[in-house]
Amino acid sequence: MKQTEGQKNPLSGEVEKEWRLDEKDLGDWAHQFGTSLTPGMVILLYGAMGSGKTTLVRHLMKSIGAEEASSPTFSIVNEYDSPLGTIYHFDLYRLEKEEELEDIGFEEYLESGNICLIEWPELGEMFYPFDSKALYIRVMEDGRRKVQLIKGIA
């Protein structure tokens, strides 16, 4: 697992940390990243279909002793109990309009003081707090994942 710091991401600003992960590295990454989670954090998960967003969440939940995570594609939001309190895991892929976020009380989830992990976050960008973190996940040619932690709103 290789990590670099302080690089620029041309799409969204400063890269706080970067990892290149093999599948065997996911558990170690999740344990390391999980130690940085605090109640109220909003983490935006960007990546192409099949890049591993839900897989990273599953490993992350396991590393912090939370309930087992599953994809919220059809439910839109899953709720997990954890030692850090309730964690909300969103998948906004199927939503088409900002009004749909209002219908599910999206802003209330974000303001709840609980950790929110959001896959396909593009639709909700107007709602995110300034101190949100973004994880960009890209599949590299060799099959490894390049994960970049971006400071602030992406």
Image: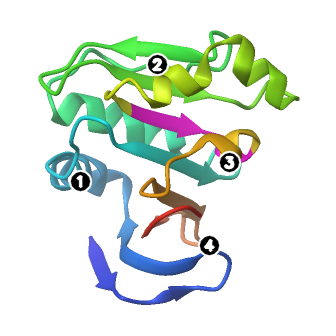
The nearer-to-camera label among 4 and 3 is 3
Disc 2 versus disc 3: distance between alpha carbons?
23 Å
Q: How far apart are marks 2 and 4 (CA)?
A: 27 Å
Residue under label 2: 70
Q: What residue type is labelled 2?
A: Ser
Contact flag, marks 4 and 3 (Cβ < 8 Å): no
What are the residue bounds of the magenta stretch?
Answer: 116-122
Quadrant of the image for the C terminus? bottom right
- Res. 33 mark: 1
Label 4: element kind: loop
Could you classify mark 3 by the number of other residues whose Cα lies within 10 Å: few (under 14), some (14-19), or many (20 or more)?
few
Q: Depth-wise, is mark 2 or mark 3 nearer the camera?
A: 3
Q: Label 1: state its secondary structure.
A: helix
Q: Mark 4 points at which residue?
A: 141
Question: Would you say 48 lies left or right of 59 here?
Answer: right
CA separation in Å, label 1 and label 2: 19 Å
Residue 77 among those drawn in magenta: no
Q: Which mark sits nearer the N-terminus, 1 or 2?
A: 1
Secondary structure of the residue carrying tag 2 is loop
Q: Quadrant of residue 107?
A: top right
- From the top left corner, tell me how far across and down residue 29 is, in percent: 25, 55
N-terminal of the pair, mark 1 or mark 3, is 1
Residue visible at 27% across and 57% down in the picture: 25
Q: Position of residue 68 (x, y in %)?
A: 31, 17
Q: Mark 3 highlights which residue?
A: 125
